[in-house]
């Protein structure tokens, strides 16, 4: 029987080989990041509690905890060299070390976003010998659309995140779209959403496009998640969570736009 360490390293190697064969540029980034207090964003400060950070002299350092975040920070200071990149390596979150495999496509077309997903799908099926059992889709601006008729505050957002139908019903009324969606099974929520708002709204167009795409690949059921708030402020579009059948792994990713526009997918082993 092959040693588990060799098996884990082979998973990384085979991922990189597949990504390279599909025209993703392989990159390597420092495991130890140098941080500058004066340039830390509100996003950086919020994640400090989960990061391994230390100071040496006047310099601040941190162990890498997310490749996408690291690359967004890097390209604030350096020119973009490649539009499609792949990486594999260690990340540390809450003092726990794990391996992250990922793809980033910068300034992508819809077809390039689909190519990114299909690259991971190929890896999951060929190398992990697994399948995508179901997907969860959403849009980080969906809450703004749903609450566009009310002055929403953090309390409402908290109740939505908690799926607290009782409090939301009292605050918004039974007929409000938020309440109606939460009372509907998640695999039927997108259909209901299309009856509540114009289908040509950019958020619905994005969600419907993903729905059609996944069905074309034979991936069902497709659930809508209307509750999350973005983990970083630059996540402003659609997101997906593809749950694997045999393992408890989840392929996650989404669209982001700030100083850098891109679509990223990651799988944490």
Image: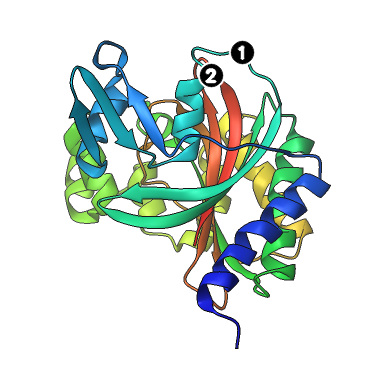
* Mark 1 closeness class: few <14, some 14–19, many ≥20 residues within 10 Å: few
- The residue shown at (19%, 17%) is 58
Quarter holding the N terminus is bottom right
* Mark 2 closeness class: few <14, some 14–19, many ≥20 residues within 10 Å: few
Residue labelled with disc 1 = 79
Residue 20 lies left or right of residue 198; in this view the side is right
The residue most toward the front is: 57
Q: Nearer the viewer, residue 49 or 56?
A: 56
Marks counted in the figure total 2
Residue labelled with disc 2 = 75
Q: CA distance from mark 2 to mark 1?
A: 6 Å
The label on residue 262 is none
Q: Quadrant of residue 26?
A: top right
Residue 82 lies left or right of residue 79; in this view the side is right
Image location (x, y in percent) of residue 152:
25, 28
- The residue shown at (44%, 32%) is 69
Residue 120 appears in view: yes
- The residue shown at (70%, 39%) is 113
Note whether 127 is above or below 252 in the view shown.
Answer: below
Residue 175 appears in view: no
Image location (x, y in percent) of residue 65:
38, 42
- The residue shown at (23%, 36%) is 53
Q: Secondary structure at mark 2?
A: loop
Note whether 70 is above or below 92 in the view shown.
Answer: above
Q: Quadrant of residue 195?
A: top right
Q: Are marks 2 and 1 in contact (CB under 8 Å)?
A: yes
């Amino acid at each position: 029987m092959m040693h588990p360490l060799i098996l884990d390293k082979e998973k990384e190697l085979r991922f990189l080989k597949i990504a390279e064969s599909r025209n993703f540029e392989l990159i390597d980034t420092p495991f130890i990041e140098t941080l500058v207090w004066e340039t830390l964003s509100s996003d950086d400060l919020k994640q400090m509690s989960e990061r391994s950070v230390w100071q040496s002299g006047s310099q601040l350092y941190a162990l890498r905890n997310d490749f996408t975040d690291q690359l967004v920070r890097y390209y604030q200071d350096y020119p973009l060299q490649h539009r499609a990149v792949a990486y594999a390596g260690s990340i540390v979150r809450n003092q726990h070390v794990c391996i992250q495999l990922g793809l980033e496509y910068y300034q992508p077309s819809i077809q390039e976003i689909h190519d990114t997903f299909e690259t991971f799908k190929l890896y999951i099926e060929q190398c992990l010998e697994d399948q995508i059992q179901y997907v969860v889709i959403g849009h980080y601006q969906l809450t703004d659309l749903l609450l566009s008729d009310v002055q929403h505050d953090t309390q409402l957002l908290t109740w939505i995140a908690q799926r607290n139908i009782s409090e939301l019903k009292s605050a918004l009324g039974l007929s409000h779209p938020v309440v109606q969606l939460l009372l509907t099974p998640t695999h039927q929520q997108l259909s209901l959403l299309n009856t509540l708002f114009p289908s040509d709204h950019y958020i619905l167009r994005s969600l419907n496009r993903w729905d059609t795409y996944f069905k074309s690949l034979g991936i069902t059921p497709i659930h809508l998640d209307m509750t999350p708030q973005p983990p970083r402020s630059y996540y402003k579009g659609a997101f997906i969570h593809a749950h694997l059948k045999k393992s408890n792994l989840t392929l996650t990713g989404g669209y982001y736009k700030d100083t850098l526009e891109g679509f990223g997918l990651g799988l944490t082993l």
